[in-house]
Amino acid sequence: MLEHGGRLHQAVITYGIAPADWLDLSTGISPHAWPVPELPAEAWQRLPEDDDGLVDVAQAYYGAPQLLPVAGSQAAIQALPSLRGPSRVGVIAPGYNEHAHAWRRAGHEVSCLSASSLLERVDGLDVIVLIHPNNPGGERFEREALLACHARLSARGGWLIVDEAFMDVTPEDSLSPFATRDDLVVLRSVGKFFGLAGIRAGFVCASRPLLDTLRDYLGPWTLSGPTRHVLKLALADRGWQTEARGWLRHRSARLAEVLRMHAITPTAGCALFHWWRDEQAPMWHHALAARGILTRLFDEPRSLRFGLPADEAGLLRLGEALASIRSMGLGR
């Protein structure tokens, strides 16, 4: 199992700090979650049904002509490598490590490359996996450049896979509307923007033949009844979505401001996190954790990802901790 953010229970054991006393900034999950209402009893009592209206609501939200609900984009990340024969696969790096892990485990030849290198080496690869915007590197791509990349791959039967887990704040940049094209796969996640990571839900936007193959591979009931009920409501709540986008942009700007005040200038980021690359990242990670603030530490390259505090009190606590650590000489 690879390391991920959100391992609060492990931090509790390691640092001896009670769960309620932590400020958890280790994930890119919005702390401003969509408010889940009380669920009807039938959501728990009946088997999920595919024709319950969820697909229609999701297609409208993502602007996707066709899609498949899955148990988080992670389910698709693990399944897609099994749907191709041996391939030369280029995966963006640094990035979400599960992509490269899944393709290697399925026996493919995997190269982890920078965003610019991937687009330059299209003709030498069968599959390209991008994250847009990238996590944690923050890279963004022009839509026309991605479509051109896809066209070159598809001409040889290759795939372009674009993980858009952090796209919801800028939906106008999504490739979901183009995912009817053969060999283009767009992954969408509900957990980040809606703050609903616990329901493990996502969608795959792709051509109908590929979606049918993936559906057969995953089997029935990929999402539970309660999950489907919540998703139909959340994806249709346009008022909340508009408000959430403004809130996230503001909180992201405030987080960047606090980090810069303490000479932690973000290397990159998006509306849901900021990423700081520095050789002293492990020391900062442990110093913050000793003060009950959990960040996401990356070993290669050495760096920290800061998720969004939920409020000004959280930002104040982070700022005070950074100042305290600076005063002890770290980073000088």
Image (cartoon, helix red, strand yellow):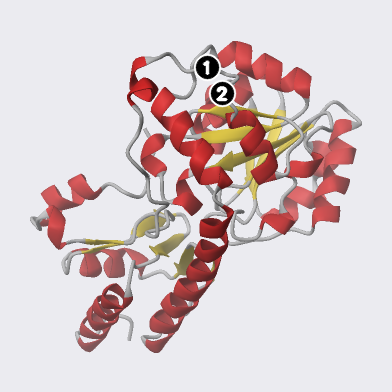
Judged from the image, the secondary structure of the residue bearing numbered disc 1 is: loop
Looking at the picture, which amino acid does disc 1 mark?
Answer: Glu
What quarter of the picture does the C terminus occupy?
A: bottom left
Image coords of residue 321 (percent x, y) = 23, 78
Judged from the image, the secondary structure of the residue bearing numbered disc 2 is: loop
Mark count = 2
Quadrant hosting residue 16: bottom left
User: Residue at point 65% right, 52% down?
Assistant: 132
Quick check: 302 left or right of 163?
left
User: Residue at point 40% right, 43% down?
Assistant: 197
Quick check: 78 left or right of 325?
right
Q: CA distance from mark 1 to mark 2?
A: 6 Å
Give the number of the disc on residue 49: 1
Quick check: 193 left or right of 19?
right
Closer-to-camera residue (202/51): 51
What quarter of the picture does the N terminus occupy?
A: top left
User: Residue at point 65% right, 60% down?
Assistant: 170
Q: Is residue 157 above or below residue 47?
A: below
Q: Are marks 1 and 2 in contact (CB under 8 Å)?
A: yes
User: Residue at point 32% right, 49% down?
Assistant: 6
Quick check: 49 left or right of 208?
left
Give the number of the disc on residue 52: 2
Image coords of residue 29 (percent x, y) = 42, 53
Mark 1 neighbour class, 10 Å CA radius: few under 14, some 14 to 19, many 20 or more: some
